[in-house]
Image (cartoon, rainbow, N blue to C red):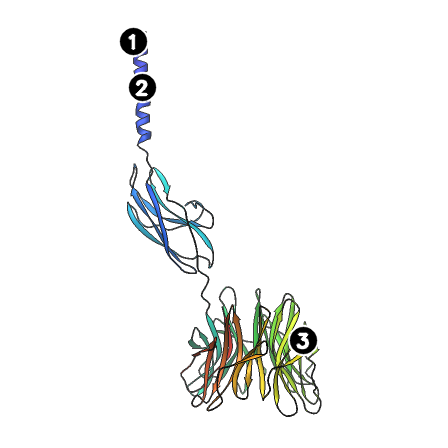
Amino acid sequence: MKTILSVALSTAVIFFSCKKDKEADIVLPTVTTIPVSVTTSSEAMAGGEISNQGSAAVTARGVVWGTTANPTIDLTSKTSDGAGIGFFTSSITGLQPNTAYHVRAYATSSAGTAYGNDISFTTDAPVPKVYACGYDRSTGDDHASLWADGTGSFLASSSLKSYASSIAVSDAGDVYVVGWDFTGGIDNAKIWKNGVATVLSNSNSRANSVVISGSDVYVAGFIDNGSNYVATYWKNGTAIGLTDGIRTATASSIFVSGSDVYVAGYENSGSVDVACYWKNGAKVVLPNVTSGGKYSRANSIFVSGGDDVYVAGYQFNGTIEIAKYWKNGASIDLGTYSSRANSIFVSGGDVYVAGYEKGAAKYWKNGVETSFTATASYSAEAKSIFVSGSDVYVAVTEYGFPSGEKAKYFKNGVETILSTGDRSGAFGIVVK
């Protein structure tokens, strides 16, 4: 009996000793995460070092990342960068701008997966792109054009005269441009989405302004009913008339605030054009003296703070046209000499209005003017203004440069020439 017990105990000692030795042989790799070295708004460069493979060869390695600490390969995105020990780097792509991330290096063997230390980083804010639209001359005619960061492309066929008047860019990066081309002896309102054209009306018509609200695309312009222009806007391609067509009227600009649709333009009173805007189809006449041939027009509209309505345009005072804007109907003159206001933008309580006065392109910030061009050998007109943070962008068409017309834009007063051709113009600008 003693002999049997001794044998059993010896066997147990040997069994547990072998099991303990076997467990001791299972060792995970040793991994260190190296710091993130390069980041942009959507990419980063990370990596790691595997200094010891452990008890088995490393069959997969890379980095894993996510928006919470200590990401794992089971839950978040990862890269795969070969096998073996040593240093490695990994390119991380598809990140969101201005977002905090966590990253860890990992190494996998038959023993399991080991992770390096958790490192956090934040991607850069997106670099805004400057989009401008207008026209450029090719094969002897003007053609609707789009410029992205100064690089131009034609939107319409080279066989058609065409113009692009306004531009908007969605959060998804889709670029919408509106304007018109000259087909069959008449103008035809059009919209281009990422360069693909859709006709809004095959009657004599123009599209003057575009805005995006959520997934809806709104366009303002006019359609000729055979006798007069009818102020019109389109929602997702469906035309909505704002006037009855008895007197001519035009929609020049559109803005959407919440569920409210604002459209600025003018309607003829029977003797003169009268600046106005429509809120959800209801007409609001902008106060002005319009008797005795004193006409007025509204060219641009912007709604700020939910219910403050700003409209830019001009009034003929009996002698000259005067640039102005209206805030909730109250009129503020901007120009002293012959002038027009073409575009308005409100940012942080500051009111920016672009236009021209006495032949010089300019914008007014809270009534204080900034000019871009002299009047000695050429003149210019600021057509559109956009404010991004502290940066002010203005689309300008310059005349006689030294001949013809020239499309350009200014960022904080520094010019970028958009076309080197003999005739071009910039009508719209947006930064996204």
Q: Which mark is residue 3?
A: 1
Q: Can the viewer see residue 312?
A: yes
Residue at the front extreme, as displayed: 368
In this view, the residue farthest toward the top is 1
Name which residue lies at 42% across and 81% down: 419
Mark closer to the chain start, 2 or 1 = 1
Instruction: Tell me if residue 36 comes above or below residue 20 in the rendering.
Output: below
Amino acid under disc 3: Trp
* Mark 2 vs mark 3, CA separation in Å: 94 Å
Left or right, 37 with respect to 238, comes to left
Q: Position of residue 341 (x, y in %)?
A: 58, 82
Residue 13 marker: 2
Mark 2 or mark 1, which is nearer to you?
2
Quarter of the figure that contains the N terminus: top left
As drawn, the label of residue 278 is 3
- CB-based contact (under 8 Å), mark 3 and mark 1: no
The mark lying in front, picked from 3 and 1, is 3
Relative to 364, 131 lies left or right: left
Residue shown at 52% from the left, 64% from the top = 171
Visible in this render: residue 155? no
Query: For numbered disc 1, what is the local secondary structure?
Result: helix
Whole-number angstrom distance, CA of label 3 to CA of label 1: 108 Å
